[in-house]
């Protein structure tokens, strides 16, 4: 029998790539996409409009479709969260609590997205371990630490099969990122292809863990497909691929666009970036369920530019 799957935050940077991937694996009618924004005119397939803070909306969907799996992506990100901390708390925490409660009732398998934002200035910066100090300085990070603990609690207390990844900054070309600190990396690509220079909101030596979206989607599906006994971490797995300084990305893009220039003018988002690790140790994910990345900086830059050139020109 086919699986019924719900993706919340389906119009976002990750959802817009995860939904088509799930549809190609499970069939287009079995993947239900939900977002509180309206779909663009050229959106392919059905998109339900609803707010994850509204438990009734979610409950009715669960009753109607009896989901086997839910990918809960609806969230505010770090930069928007700092502008609207109350809303970030409500969306990120109420949404997750409703999803976990309904999953408990209906025995649904859950994927929930955490982030490198769980780490803070007291966390070891290099090869940040799986189990370490979690003292974030952003409200976004606070919701991610709280969410991780809630997921683990529902697993321990109710035997809920909930799985999660601490995504690094994700780089993609299909949908623009939605208000995070790592957005600068994607913006740099757009400006280069549009033939403009870029004013970067973090300084040139800012080093952060990053990942190409194709790797992130593959990792997400691999985690969800892994046998239950392989999943040893029920907070959230460190999930890593590459890391670079903003200047490294500029130099790599300049190999393709020699005239492209970046000016560095850090704003309030620099503080978020400074509180996150340079690199993350994801050996636990590699050992437990066989995570492996495919894209290094050179390969990612080449593919990003090719795809953006096709999209924009
Ligand atoms: P995004 O901002 O691009 O998309 C989020 C989507 O959620 C948007 O389409 C938005 O309309 C929707 N949404 C927001 N509030 C909602 C609500 N109340 N009800 C229903 N929908 C709502 O975010 P993303 O980059 O796709 O991130 C998805 C998840 O992955 C989030 O939990 C985020 O914290 C996590 N994550 C993302 C990154 C990244 O670099 N993109 C890195 C680490 C973690
Ligand atoms: N890309 C995300 C952000 O910058 C990390 O979770 O908010």
Image (spheres, rainbow, N blue to C red):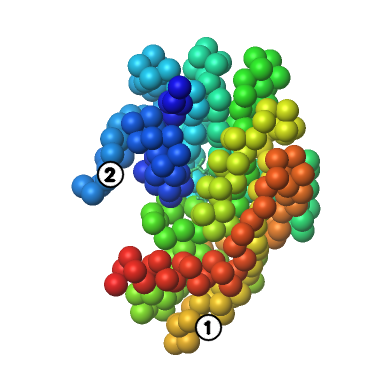
Looking at the image, which residue sits at the far front?
1
Q: Position of residue 4 (x, y in %)?
A: 43, 26
The residue lying at 68 percent from left, 28 percent from top is 228
Q: Are marks 2 and 1 in contact (CB under 8 Å)?
A: no
Q: Is residue 304 above or below residue 137?
A: below
Find numbered disc 2 in the image and state the secondary structure of the residue it sits on: loop
- The one of 1 and 175 positioned closer to us in this rendering: 1
- Quick check: can you spot residue 241? yes
Query: Image quadrant for the C terminus?
Result: bottom left
Nearest to the eye among marks 2 and 1: give it: 2
Which sits earlier in the primary sequence, circle 2 or circle 1?
2
The residue lying at 38 percent from left, 74 percent from top is 193
Residue designated by label 1 = 255
Find numbered disc 1 in the image and state the secondary structure of the residue it sits on: loop
The residue lying at 44 percent from left, 44 percent from top is 21
Q: Report the disc number at residue 44.
A: 2
Label 1: how many Cα within 10 Å (few below 14, some 14–19, many 20+): few
């Amino acid at each position: 029998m086919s699986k019924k799957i719900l993706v919340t935050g389906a119009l976002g940077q990750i959802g817009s790539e995860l939904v088509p991937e799930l549809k190609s694996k499970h069939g287009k009618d079995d993947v239900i996409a939900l977002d509180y924004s309206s779909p663009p005119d050229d959106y392919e397939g059905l998109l339900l409009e609803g707010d994850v803070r509204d438990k009734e909306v979610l409950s009715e969907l669960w009753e109607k479709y009896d989901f086997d799996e839910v990918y809960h992506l609806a969230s505010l990100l770090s930069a928007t969260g700092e502008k609207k901390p109350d809303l970030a708390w409500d969306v990120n925490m109420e949404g997750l609590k409703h999803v976990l409660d309904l999953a408990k009732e209906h025995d649904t398998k859950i994927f929930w997205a955490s982030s490198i934002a769980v780490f803070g200035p007291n966390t070891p910066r290099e090869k940040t371990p799986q189990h370490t100090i979690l003292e974030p300085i952003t409200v976004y990070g606070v919701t991610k630490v709280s969410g991780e603990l809630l997921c683990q609690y529902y697993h321990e207390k109710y035997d809920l099969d909930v799985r999660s990844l601490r995504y690094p900054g994700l780089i993609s070309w299909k949908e623009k990122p939605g208000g995070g600190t790592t957005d600068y990396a994607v913006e740099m690509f757009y400006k280069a292809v549009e033939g403009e220079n870029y004013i970067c909101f973090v300084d040139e030596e800012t080093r952060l863990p990053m990942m190409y979206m194709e790797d992130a989607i593959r990792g997400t599906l691999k985690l969800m497909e892994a046998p239950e006994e392989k999943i040893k971490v029920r907070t959230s797995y460190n999930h890593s691929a590459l890391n670079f300084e903003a200047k490294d990305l500029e130099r790599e893009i300049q190999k393709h666009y020699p005239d492209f220039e970046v000016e560095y003018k850090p704003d309030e988002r620099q503080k978020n970036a400074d509180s996150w690790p340079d690199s993350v140790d994801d050996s636990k994910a590699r050992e437990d369920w066989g995570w492996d990345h495919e894209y290094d900086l050179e390969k990612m830059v080449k593919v990003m530019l090719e795809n953006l050139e096709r999209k924009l020109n």
